[in-house]
Image (cartoon, rainbow, N blue to C red):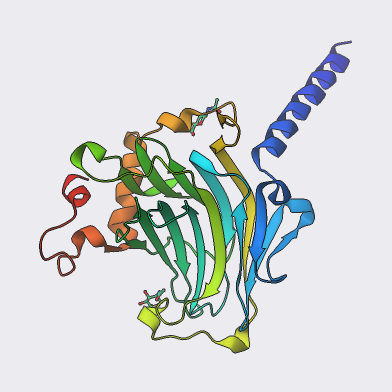
């Protein structure tokens, strides 16, 4: 009797586990719409994989079907391999209109073996100019890595493989606008920006290497979705109040000390009249 009960228990448990896993990583067919690129964006493997490609004629892109009002979004990306100079893979949250909010990841390609730049920015009510840039501590073209945006009422946290690299706090009480009134969608695109992307535009796209392809998998949006009612999906909405604990603070410091290559808050040439308010507080 006992062995039978055990194997039944194992069967039940593994079924539960499988359900959690499949529920956890959503299907691209369900979550996103391909919006441009005339067939250059493809959803493959029954929705488990999405690829964007770029050639001399066009890039391509997709956007989330849902609009989010606060979210924690994790996606795995594998960037354009080889000579990706001149290409930009953008992955960001954005609302619409002239006073839009935006939370950006942009991956600036490079010559083979030379480092990508991960460019980040935050726009609130139409105003950006908050660039911070990083090198990565791995080759982002060799395998998939997880890039996450946590956006809750108190803070925005950008993370790479679970390591926070940037935090933008809600400092409305000090007069700094914060994105919290406009719902946002995820947008992603692969496009040519060889007028600025690689070494400031010095290195151009080598079209003989086209098409360029970036891949996406395991799109996971724990979010409050703007639909009929303001409901937050998922049983675990601890992200809604999440902040950086001591371990995460230490990781953030490590990433910034070793991999940050540009910080608007340290660019005194750019702000001769004094740094923006958030720079003096964070
Ligand atoms: C490309 O490589 C050069 C040389 O290593 C480096 O200076 C630059 O930051 C790299 N990244 C980009 C996007 O230009
Ligand atoms: C809920 O999510 C947080 C991080 O977002 C995680 O640390 C915690 O373990 C999760 N809790 C459960 C029960 O899954």
Task: Quarter of the image for the C terminus: give it.
Answer: top left
Query: Where does the image place residue 226, in percent across and percent down from the top left?
Result: 55, 37
Left of 67 or right of it: where is 272? left
Q: Is residue 102 above or below residue 61?
A: above
Left of 246 or right of it: where is 3? right
Query: Where does the image place residue 185, in percent across and percent down from the top left?
Result: 53, 49
Left of 279 or right of it: where is 102? right
Tell me the quarter of the picture where residue 13 sits: top right
Tell me the quarter of the picture where residue 57 sits: bottom right
Q: Residue at x 62, y 59 (%)?
A: 62
Task: Quarter of the image for the N terminus: give it.
Answer: top right
Q: Residue at x 30, y 54 (%)?
A: 256
Q: Residue at x 59, y 26 (%)?
A: 235
As rendered, which of 20 and 4 lies closer to the eye?
Answer: 20
Query: Where does the image place residue 155, in percent across and percent down from the top left?
Result: 35, 40
Q: Is residue 142 above or below residue 185?
A: below
Q: Is residue 152 above or below residue 113?
A: above
Residue at the left extreme, as displayed: 273
């Amino acid at each position: 009797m006992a062995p039978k009960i055990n194997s039944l228990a194992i069967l039940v448990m593994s079924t539960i586990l499988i359900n959690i896993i499949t529920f956890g990583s959503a299907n691209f067919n369900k979550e996103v719409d391909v919006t441009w690129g005339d067939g250059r964006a493809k959803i493959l493997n029954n929705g488990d994989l999405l690829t964007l490609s770029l050639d001399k004629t066009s890039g391509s892109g997709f956007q989330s079907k849902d609009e989010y009002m606060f979210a924690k979004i994790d996606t795995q990306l594998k960037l354009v391999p080889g000579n990706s100079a001149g290409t930009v893979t953008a992955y960001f949250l954005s609302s619409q209109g002239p006073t839009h909010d935006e939370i950006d990841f942009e991956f600036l390609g490079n010559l083979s073996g030379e480092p990508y730049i991960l460019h980040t920015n935050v726009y609130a009510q139409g105003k950006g100019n908050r660039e911070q840039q990083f090198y990565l501590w791995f080759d982002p073209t060799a395998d998939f890595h997880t890039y996450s945006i946590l956006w809750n009422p108190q803070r925005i946290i950008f993370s790479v493989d679970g390591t926070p690299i940037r935090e933008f706090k809600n400092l409305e009480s000090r007069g700094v606008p914060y994105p919290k009134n406009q719902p946002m969608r995820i947008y992603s695109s692969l496009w040519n920006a060889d007028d600025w992307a690689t070494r400031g535009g010095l290195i151009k796209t080598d079209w003989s290497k086209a098409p360029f392809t970036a891949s996406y998998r395991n799109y996971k949006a724990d979010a409050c979705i703007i639909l009929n009612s303001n409901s937050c999906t998922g049983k675990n909405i601890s992200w809604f109040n999440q902040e950086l604990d001591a371990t995460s603070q230490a990781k953030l410091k490590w990433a910034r000390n070793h991999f940050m290559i540009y910080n608007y808050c340290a660019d005194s040439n750019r702000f001769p009249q004094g740094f923006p308010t958030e720079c003096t507080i964070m």
